[in-house]
Image: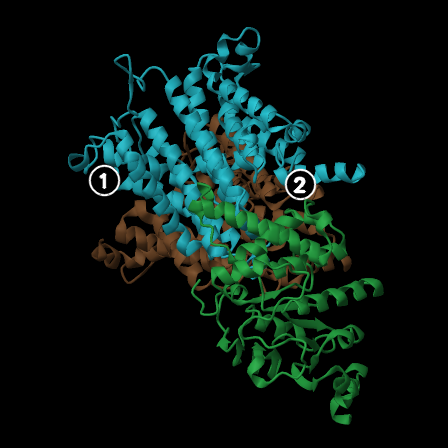
Chain colours: A cyan, B green, C brown
Amino acid sequence: MSEKASFRTSGGVRGWFGRQPWYVRAVLILFFTVLAYLLPYAGDVPLIGPQIITEGIDWPSALFNMSYYVLLALGLNVVVGYAGLLDLGYVGFFAVGAYGTALLTSPDSVIYADTGWKWLMAVPAALVLTMLAGVILGWPTLRLRGDYLAIVTLGFAEIIRIVATSTTTLRGDRGFASIPHPPGSWNGEPIFGVTDAIPYFWLGLTVIILVILGVRNLDRSRVGRSWLAIREDEEAAEVMGVRTFKYKLWAFAIGAFIGGLGGVLFAGEQSFINSQTFVLQFSILVLAGVVMGGSGNMAGAILGGVLISYIPDRLRGLSFGDTDLYEYRFAIFGAAIILIMVLRPQGLIPSRRRAMELKDREKEVAPL
Amino acid sequence: MSEPHQKTPEELDRENARPVDQPAPTGGSASAPATRSVSGDDVLLEVDHVTLRFGGVVALNDVSFSLRKGEIFGLIGPNGAGKTTCFNAMTGVYRPTEGAIRFQGESIVGKKKHQITRGGIARTFQNVRLFPEMTALENVMVGADAHHKTSVISALFRLPRFWREEKSGRERSLELLRFVGIAHRAGDVSRNLSYGEQRRLEIARALATNPTLLCLDEPAAGFNPAEKEDLLQLIRRIRDTGVTVLLIEHDMRLVMGVTDRIVVLEFGKKIAEGTPAEVRDNPAVIAAYLGVPTDAA
Amino acid sequence: MDFSGLINDFGPLTVTGLAQGAIIALFALGYTLVYGVLRLINFAHSEVFLLGTYACLFVWGLFGLDQNSATPSVGPMLLYMVIGLIAAIVVSGATALTVEFVAYRPLRRRNAPPLAFLITAIGASLFISEVVGVTTHRNQTGVPPIIQARPLFTIGDTTVTNLQVLIILLALVMMFALDRFINGSRLGRGVRAVAQNPDSAALMGVNKSRVIALVFLLGGLMAGIAAVMYDLKIGVTRYDAGFLLGIDAFTAAVLGGIGNLRGALLGGLLLGVLQNYAAGLFGSQWLHAASFVLLVVILLFRPTGLLGESLGRSRA
C-alpha cells in the first residue's frame, strides 16, 4: 500500500514518506485510498475537477477502463519488471480470462446448457484457466533466451486471437453476448447495472488494492528476492541455489493470473466480447505503460497504466488548427513515449532500489 | 529437494543457531579438522580422471585429485592452465567429457547448478557477481534462501513458515555479514560497496547457503598486501567453522601461506600434488612458473 | 485437415511460398543486422517497410498511375520499376536512419537499460503507423499493375509466373550483394568487428556510431526493396501491413538464427513455404499460428536458430 500512496508523490516525497512513523503513514494511505474511491465524483470538485475529467465521455466508464489497464500493468510488471522476462503477448492472458468467463456464462456458449453459470461462479474457473495458460506457455518457452521469449509470447497472443477469430466455438466476430454482470443488489436494484459504471470502478479498484497487497507480499519475501536475483544475474542466482526456472514459471503464472483478473472484470462489465477486442497492439501498449511508468516498481506500473488509458482519452475533443487531435491520439501517444523514454530512461518513477541509492548518499553525508 | 545428503530441518536449525564466528563443533561424520593427516575415508570431493574438451581443444586432460574434509585446498597454475575450467566442472557449470566428479561419494555430473549448491558446494566468482541493485543484506539472504522452504503461497498469505524463515534468514545473514566484517553496510545497495567489501559480501553470500565445501575463485585478485592478509585470516576462520575450502589462485605466496595441500595444473594436466613445501620444491612446478618447458626440467 | 488439398496444390503452394519467403527474408535482414550489432529488437523496422510500400505508390501516382491503370509496355515498365525501387529505398533508408537518430541514439548516449530501447522503438512504430493510418483513413490503397503476373513456364502442373521469378531472383541477388559487402568490404569488416566485440572494435579505430548508422541504412534499403515486391505481389497495402508482415519477418530472422544474414534468407524462405503448406492443410487463417508453433519447436531443439547467431563469426 505504501507503493500505492507513493505513486502520487515524487521521489523526494517518497523518501519523506518512508521516514514517517507508522501511524502517519497509515493515515496518509487511508486518506489516498478514500480519495481513490471518490474519483468518480472528481467532476464535482470546483475548479480542479473540470480540468481532470475529459469532456464528452462517461467519466466513470473511463475510470473503469483505467482500472483494468492498471491491473494489466501491475500483472505485466511482475513478469517484466520483477523477473525481467520480456512478454510481448500479455494481452493473450487478458483474452483467456475474458473468453473463459464468456464460455462459462454466455448463452451463446456451446457449453452454456451444461453450466449456465453466473459471473461469480465463472471467476475462479476462468482464473485457473488463465494460470494454466501461463504455465503451458511458460513451460517450453522459459528455457529460451530473453529475446526469443519476446517473439514466442508475441506468437502466443497471435494464436489466441487467431483461434478466437477462426473457430466456431469461440464465435469470431459474432462474439459472446449477455455475459452476466457481477452479482449483488441494493434496495432491490442490481448494483452492477448497465448505465452506471461507478460500481464497476469500485470493484476494479478493490481488486487492484488486493493485487497490490499480494504482489507486495511476494516482493518482500524469498520469492521477490529470487525474481530480482534472476533479473540481475541469472547464472549467479542459480549458483546461489535459486531455482530459476521454477520462479520464472511462477512469475509467468502470477502475471497470467492478474491479466486474467483484468479479463474477467472486463467481460463482466462489457457483457459482450468478440475477437476484435484483443488486438496485439494492446499488449504492446501495456508494456509501454509499464516501462514508461518505471518497471520493477508498482507505483510506476500504476502510473503507466493510468497514462496509457488517460492520455488518449484526454485528447478527445481537442483540436489543433483544423486537425482533430483525437484522431491522432495514438500517434501523439507514440511520440510521447519516445519523449518520455529519452528524457527519463528509467521511467517516470524509477524503482525503489534507485531511490534507495539516493538515500544511501544521504546517509553517507550524515555521520553515523 | 530430495537429495540424500539434504540436511534435515533440525540440523539446519542447529547450524543456524550456532554463532558462525566461533569454531563449530565437528559434526557427526567429520573428523577433527585440525588434524592434517586425514585418512581416505574423509574424502569430501573426488575429481576422478576428468577430461574436458571444447571442440578440438583439450581444456582438462585426465585430471584426478581429491579434497579431504576440513582442509584448505589450493588449486594453482599459470594463467590458462585450466584452473577455472576445473572449478566450473566441479560446480556444475561445465560437464566433463570423460571421468567423474563425486561429492560426498555421489556423482554431481549432470546435476543442476542449484541442486549442487543445495547439496553443499558454494562458490564465488572470479569477477565479482553480486546482485548489484540489492542491498548487501538481501544479497546474503538470497544465499540463505537456498535452504528455505517458504512457498509462493506461504509468502503470499504470510503464513507462519514465512515469518519464521524470514526472521532466521535475516539473523543468519546479519551474522555472516558480521563474520566477514561488513555488517555496517548491511542496508546499502551492493553496487555502492567498495571492491574489497564486495568480495567479502560475495563470500558471505556463498556461506549463507550452508556449504560443506566453499570454492573461492581468485578471491584476492586486485587486493593489496594488507587486504590479502585480512583475507587469509578470513579463510582460516571459515575453515575453523568446519567448512572445507577450495582456493583457486595464481598468487603463489598467498596459497602457500594458507593451504594444507595443493594441486598444480599446467596446460590442463596435473603436474604436482602435495603440501605447500613439497610443491614449492617440485622441479616441474618451478619450471611451469618460470616458463621452462616441463620435459627439460 | 485437408491432405488432398496440400497434395494437389503442392507445387503452386511451394512456389507461392518461396516468393512470399523471399520478401520476408529481405524484410528480416533489417532485424538481423541491427540485432547482430546492437542486440536490439528494432521494433520500428516494420514501419520502415511500411513507408516503403507507400513511397513507390506515391511516385507511381505522380506518373498518373493508379490501381485501375492499364499495364504499361516493357519500356515504361522498366522505368517505373526503377523509379519505384529508388523511391522505396530512399524513403525506407531515410526512415531507418531517422529512427536511429531520434529514438535510439539519445538513449545510447544516456546508457539506458535495454528495455528502454524497445519502448522507444514501440513509440516510433506506433507514431508512424498511426500517422499513415489517419491520413489514409485506415483504408487499403491499391497498387497499379506495373507488372502483370503472367505464366512464364510450367514444371509438371505447376505454373510459375514472371513476377514470382522476379521476386525470388531479386531477393537472391540482394542477399548475395549484401553478403559480399559485409564479408568483403572494409566497411563490412567494421560491421563484423562491432558485432563481435563493440569495445575492442572501438579500440581498433572502428567508428561505432557510423557502423550503427550503416546497419540501419542497409536494413532500410533491403526493406525498401521488399516493400516494392510486396506491393506488386499483394496488390494492396495498408497502414498495418508493416506490423503484420514484420512479425513474420522477425520470426524468420529468429528461425534462421538472429544476427546471421544467411539465416535470415533460410528462415524467410522456409517460413514462406511452410506457411503456405499450413494454409493448404488447415486453411489460410491458420497461417500465422502454424509459423509460431514451428518457431517454438525449432527453438526448443536449436536454441540459437537453424544457422546459429553471430553476425561476425559465422561468415554472415
The chain containing the residue under callout 2 comes to C
Residue A355, image x and y in percent? Answer: 66, 37
The vertical placement of B219 against B73, above or below, is above
Residue sticking out furthest to the front: B25
How far apart marks 1 and 2 lie (CA) works out to: 46 Å
Residue at the spot x=34%, y=47% of the render? Answer: A132
Three-letter code, disc 2? Leu
Residue closer to the observer: A111 or B109? B109
Residue sticking out furthest to the right: B225
The chain containing the residue under callout 1 comes to A
Q: Are marks 1 and 2 in contact (CB under 8 Å)?
A: no
Residue C32 at least partly seen: yes
Which residue was labeled with disc 1? A169
Q: Quadrant of residue A91?
A: top left
Residue A339, image x and y in percent? Answer: 63, 31
Residue closer to the observer: C313 or C158? C313
Residue B164, image x and y in percent? Answer: 51, 48
The vertical placement of B63 against A353, above or below, is below
Residue at the spot x=33%, y=34% of the render? Answer: A98
Q: Quadrant of residue C10?
A: bottom left
Residue sticking out furthest to the left: A113
The quadrant the C terminus of chain C occupies is bottom right
Residue sticking out furthest to the bottom: B296
Residue A248, image x and y in percent? Answer: 47, 51
- Mark seen at residue C107: 2
> Mark 1 vs mark 2: same chain?
no
Three-letter code, disc 1? Thr
The vertical placement of B106 against C259, above or below, is below
Neighbour tally class for label 1: few under 14, some 14-19, many 20 plus, Cα within 10 Å: some
The vertical placement of A365 against C135, above or below, is below
Residue closer to the observer: A85 or B62? B62
Residue closer to the observer: B53 or A131? A131
